[in-house]
Image (cartoon, rainbow, N blue to C red):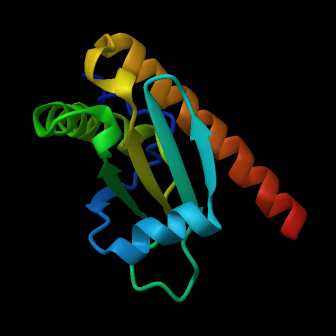
Amino acid sequence: MKPPLRSHADHGEEKKLAPLKKRAQFLLAAKKGGKAAQPGVILQYRLRPPQDDAPPREIRYGLTATRKIGCAVKRNRARRRLRALAKKLLPSHARPGLDYVLIARAATVGRESAALRDDLLRALKSADKNQKNRQARNV
């Protein structure tokens, strides 16, 4: 019997998702990090400093939906959709040591699931590429 296949990003260690809980963490991602915008979602990200108390293999993420999206029902639906995508995609496609903030857009509520998934994957790929470029410049 063959062992189960692992994703390319797994490498034997499990990455853990944890929520961003404090407003300051969201603001740091916006101020000090990068941004990748797609039609269905905006992704903000920042590299956590070494002195941060979070475990290095942990991926922290936060969700936000502003009133520009619509009433509370639409904002909650947008956050639910992004939360489900984040739990599904971030463990295998996000880089440990980064904080991510997923910002809902007006299109998030009505966008097809496959298109929203592709938007998040493109944003994660763009964030990974940009973060690698930043680290290369700083070395």
Residue 8 x, y percent position in the rendering: 51, 34
- Residue at 32% x, 66% y is 20
Query: Looking at the image, can residue 123 be seen?
Result: yes
- Residue at 30% x, 75% y is 22
Left or right of 126? Residue 119 is left
Q: Which image quadrant is residue 2 in?
A: top left
Query: Looking at the image, can residue 14 be seen?
Result: no
Q: Which image quadrant is residue 6 in?
A: top left
Toward the bottom, the furthest residue is 51
Quadrant in which the N terminus appears:
top left
Left or right of 8? Residue 59 is left
- Is residue 45 shown above or below 66? below
Toward the left, the furthest residue is 73
- Is residue 102 shown above or below 18? above
Q: Nearer the viewer, residue 99 or 9?
A: 99
- Residue at 52% x, 64% y is 29
Q: Nearer the viewer, residue 126 or 1?
A: 126
- Is residue 25 shown above or below 136? below
Q: Nearer the viewer, residue 120 or 73?
A: 73
- Is residue 44 shown above or below 93? below
Residue 119 x, y percent position in the rendering: 48, 24
- Image label count: 0
- Residue at 13% x, 40% y is 72
Quadrant in which the C terminus appears:
bottom right
Q: Nearer the viewer, residue 48 or 5?
A: 48
Left or right of 92? Residue 71 is left
Left or right of 71? Residue 14 is right
Residue 120 x, y percent position in the rendering: 46, 30
Q: Which image quadrant is residue 114 in?
A: top left
Residue 64 x, y percent position in the rendering: 32, 50
